[in-house]
Image (cartoon, rainbow, N blue to C red):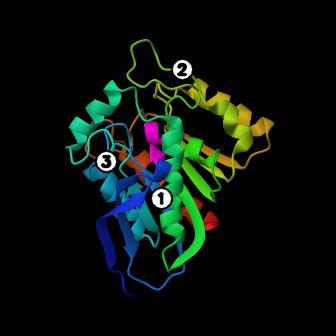
Amino acid sequence: MYDAILAETITITGHGGDPIEAYSARPMTGGPLGGVVVIHHMPGYDSPTKEITRRLAAEGYAAVCPNLYSREAPGAAPDDAAAAVRAAGGVPDGRLVGDVAGAAAYLRGLPPSNGRVGTIGYCSGGRQSFLAAASIELQAAVDCYGAFVAGRPPEGFPLQVEPIAHLAKNLSCPLLGLFGAEDSHPSPENTAELEAELQTHGKQYEFHTYDGAGHAFFAVDRPSYRPQAAVDGWSKILAFFGENL
């Protein structure tokens, strides 16, 4: 079976027509292919996020990760770019939606595309994956421990964001949520609040909470990594995308 992938840095059209950097990876096959917009975490557009993008390509999806910090820190190292964006209070919600819409349009414009696009995000990207799914037309969304979908940031927290669980009524697609029972942002109470909103509005969702796992349990390069939860989480992500994309 031919299993080559093409991975490269590209430029896509983001919010307001802005050209922004992005990382694209896709199988070198004729398709048809579903697409996934990978939304990076608060630490930024970094090597681990690019690895996730390539992993999805290896699994048979066209994937693209927009650099949400392109405007504040073009060409900067991920840590420096993330610091600049944190100092500014984070990525504005409206701009995020425009950037994801641009990434989705890029994926749908690829010759092998089947027209179906989902999102996946981690940490702040989990919140943004939910936000995108409640704002534009998508076919699947994955929220990996997205903070502040429900609940407000604590005093002094760098992100200036509001809870968005009330947007569940606008969700355009099925939602998969993967959470840690030992996490504080989101806490199990935050997850339950979001679940109640989804149930109220009759939305299709699937939530899994892992005992013994906290925030960032997918991150293989951090002490928070929990192999058993991460392996099971990946199996659920691939099954979910396989069903919906």
Q: CA distance from mark 2 to mark 3?
A: 24 Å
Q: Residue at x 39, y 13 (%)?
A: 156
Q: Is residue 171 left or right of residue 202?
A: left
Q: Amino acid at mark 2?
A: Arg
Query: 1 or 24: which is nearer to us?
Result: 24
Q: Is residue 66 above or below residue 186?
A: below
The quadrant in which the C terminus is found is: bottom right
**Residue matched to label 1:** 103
Query: 173 or 75: which is nearer to us?
Result: 75
Q: Is residue 108 above or below residue 132?
A: below
| Residue 236 in sight in this render | no
Q: Amino acid at mark 1?
A: Ala
Q: Is residue 13 left or right of residue 188?
A: left
Q: Is residue 28 above or below residue 49?
A: below
- Residue 39, percent across and down? 44, 49
Magenta region: which residues?
121-126
Q: Amino acid at mark 3?
A: Tyr
- Residue 136, percent across and down? 63, 51
| Tag 3 secondary structure | loop
Task: Compare marks 3 and 1 and give the one earlier in the sequence.
Answer: 3
Q: Is residue 73 left or right of residue 210?
A: left
Task: Name, please, the residue furthest toward the front.
Answer: 17
Q: Is residue 82 left or right of residue 239?
A: left
**How many neighbours does mark 3 have within 10 angstroms: few (below 14), some (14-19), or many (20 or more)?**
many
Which labelled disc corresponds to residue 152?
Answer: 2
Q: CA distance from mark 3 to mark 1?
A: 14 Å
Q: Quadrant of residue 94?
A: top right
Q: Residue at x 54, y 20 (%)?
A: 152
**How many neighbours does mark 1 have within 10 angstroms: few (below 14), some (14-19), or many (20 or more)?**
many
Which labelled disc corresponds to residue 45?
Answer: 3
The quadrant in which the N terminus is found is: bottom left
